[in-house]
Amino acid sequence: MLELPHTSTIEGNAIRWGRLGNGPALVAIHGTPFSSQVWRRIVPLLSDRRTVYYFDLAGYGVSEMRDGQDVSLGVQNRILAALFREWELDRPDVLAHDFGGATALRAYYLDGLRYRSLTIFDAVALAPWGSPFVQHVRQHEAAFSGMPDYMHRALLKAYLQTAAHNPLSEEALDVYGNPWLGPVGQPAFYRQIAQMDQKYTDEVQERYGRMDCPVQVLWGEQDQWIPRERGLALTSLISDLPLIAVADAGHLVQEDRPEAIVAAVLKHIELAGAPRR
């Protein structure tokens, strides 16, 4: 497990974060409903070449969870920008997944953050998005937040499994599920779903264009949450490189094919360091 020994208070949110490795900076941004532990098998393999910064988004993992908290995409990019300032980063490499992808894109196009390279995969970036389950929870958040524990556990486990193409181990299910249990975690799980609003990608989508750094887009071929066609469309807007389709992987590529992410990042950061013609 990755350690997150540091806490930063940003816009009233206690954000937990960690750092591992040596060399130029790389920032890893997780998605929903996960945490920075999605990088637990990836960060150690990058840490001999990069100082990797990782954190739990507001309302996720071991970062603060509380009633009435804003955990929407509308706040996450501002938190990322504040962390960049605190860490004194100038054009780090960035690795981003799912909501982390939306956060990295919003921070680039809305907040002016700049990256040395961006490796982005299975990202929430283009409308439409939001499964029937998400839409249902948004209409009935209170009912889901208060359901009996055994029902919530069963629903959570089934939901997490749909993110992966291959069966998740009990260890992985515990890693991703445990933060969402109990009197604090259960309502927080439904809170973040209730705040999933397409307006946060709509307001930045029309700004998409070629970024001023190398961008590599990857996509799980078996992603049941966001189809690969959405990845192809995103690639055509922001990158000069072709999309890399990851075989035998669903939305949660970190569990299905972590080696594919490591290989893509290592190749991409090497490309970013090559002289431009």
Image (tube, helix red, strand yellow):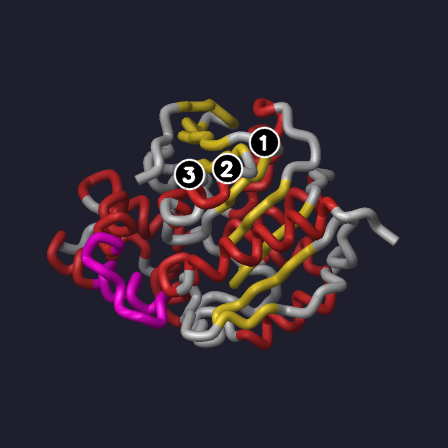
Crowdedness near tag 1: few (<14), some (14–19) or many (≥20) residues, C-alpha within 10 Å: few
Circles 2 and 1, Cβ within 8 Å, touching? The answer is yes
Where residue 4 appears, as percent x and y from the top left, is: 37, 30
Q: Mark 2 points at which residue?
A: 48
**Going by the image, does 168 lie left or right of 105?**
left
**Magenta span covers which residues?**
155-172
What residue is at 69 percent from the left and 42 percent from the top?
115
Identity of the amino acid at label 1? Gly
* Contact flag, marks 3 and 2 (Cβ < 8 Å): no
Q: Which amino acid does label 2 sit on?
A: Asp
Horizontal side, residue 147 vs residue 164: left or right: left
Task: Name the one closer to the observer, 136 or 7.
Answer: 7
Residue 72 pos. (x, y %):
49, 46
How many numbered circles are shown?
Answer: 3
Q: Which mark is residue 95?
A: none
In the image, what residue occupies the spot 45% across and 45% down?
45
Q: Position of residue 216 (x, y in %)?
A: 64, 59
Residue located beneath label 3 in the image: 56
Furthest-right residue in view? 277
Mark 2 and mark 1 lie on one chain; the one further toward the N terminus is 1
Q: Is mark 2 on a helix, strand or loop?
A: loop
- Does residue 152 appear left or right of residue 116 in this picture? left
Residue type at mark 3 is Asp
Q: Distance between the residues labelled 3 and 1?
A: 22 Å
> Circle 1 sits on which residue?
23
Disc 3 or 2, which lies upstream in sequence? 2
* Percent of width and height locating residue 218: 57, 64
